[in-house]
Amino acid sequence: MNFKRTLLIAALPLAFLAQAAQALDIKIADIHPKGYPTVVAEESMGKTLEKESNGELKFKYFPGGVLGSEKEVIEQMQAGAIQMSRVSLGIVGPVVPDVNVFNMPFIFRDQAHMRAVIDGEVGDAILDRITNSEFGLVALAWMDGGTRNLYTKKPVRKLEDLKGMKIRVQGNPMFIETINAMGGNGIAMDTGEIFSALQTGVIDGAENNPPTMLEHNHYQNAKYYSLTGHLILPEPIVMSKITWNKLTPEQQALVKKAAKAAQAEERVLWDQKSAASEEKLKAAGVEFITVDKKPFYDATAAIRAKYGAPYADLIKRIEAVQ
Ligand code: BDP
């Protein structure tokens, strides 16, 4: 064996070691601002993972929508340019139709029911459907996005008051149809466009949970909050499949475990933030309106019939969860 070759062979393991020790950068994006429950839980998930992977995974945080809208972030994750995020299930529905079962109006009895469902085998099954679809993302765990109610410039005290009002929804045809079925006029736009659309009167209202209504400043131009509770949308924590496939099985297990821990942490933060947000909204002059939900439920029966038809068995399993 000549000297040169010996050197080459001796250098090989070193090259491998150098490669293995190179940290993998994980950019994690969220449209919510710093301090928001999802963002706080993502930060502690990242810290845990940096520690437990001995620095092989390195996190960079991009809250506040700086990397784009949720739709844009999903596209960048599909291309591997962003590695992780937490997104609303609403935006996943058009691409992975199976998840629209969770997106149907009034599918969950209340928030406690939704939580019991996502914590159980149906929740895992929906995560698997996202992962096993052509979506290009691995769905790891859930975050809580509370209950969505209508907020409007003019009060909605009963179903009829919604007639003709232009209401912003997420980019999912089912949501547009839902608002239309209630007598309003559903309009899809990104989260970041809502504030000015409310301000300029392009829309008459939107619908969301109290923390989003507060933190994205929508309450400044919509002072009536009607407690319709029409949507309770959980929010998957997702990783780009391109990134996932670069991880060792051990790293994949760590990521899954840390995402599940983030699910638990976010839930506690969520309850605190929701309560605090309600107080702040009321103090800022927002009127919370209790409505009879039955007419809203009845008006949307056709949506559940249409979108739920292929999933009768799944719906039975959701309803059976106590
Ligand atoms: C919030 C969700 C966020 C959505 C937003 C929206 O947490 O993921 O993008 O609603 O409606 O509640 O755009």
Image (cartoon, rainbow, N blue to C red):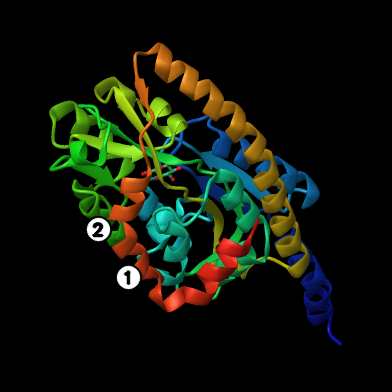
Q: Residue at x 46, y 57 (%)?
A: 107
Q: Position of residue 190 (x, y in %)?
A: 29, 45
Is label 2's Cβ within 8 Å of ligand 1? no
**Closest to the observer: 54 or 167?**
167
Splitting the image into 4 quarters, where does residue 321 fall?
bottom right
Q: Is residue 1 left or right of residue 155?
A: right
Q: Residues within 10 Å of mark 2 (few under 14, many from 20)?
A: some
Examine the rendered structure and indicate whether residue 265 appears above or below residue 198.
below
Q: CA distance from mark 1 to mark 2?
A: 11 Å
Find the residue positioned furthest to the right.
Answer: 1
Marks 1/2 in contact by CB < 8 Å: the verdict is: yes
Q: Which residue is mark 2?
A: 177
Label disc, if present, on residue 153 of the rendered structure: none
Name which residue lies at 65% across and 47% down.
Answer: 263
Within 10 Å of the Cα at label 1, are there few (<14), some (14-19), or many (20+) other Cα atoms? Answer: few
Horizontal arrangement in the rendering, residue 245 relative to residue 105 (left or right): right
Query: Residue pushed farthest bottom?
Result: 1
Q: Is residue 259 left or right of residue 211?
A: right
Q: Nearer the viewer, mark 1 or mark 2?
A: 1
Which residue lies under the disc numbered 1?
Answer: 306
Quadrant where the image shows the N terminus: bottom right
Name the amino acid, label 1: Lys
Element carrying mark 2: helix
Tell me the quadrant of the picture where the C terminus can be found. bottom right
Residue drawn at x 84%, y 79% is: 6
Say which of 19 and 217 sits in front. Answer: 217
Which quarter of the frame holds ligand 1? top left
Please state which amino acid type lies under the numbered disc 2: Glu
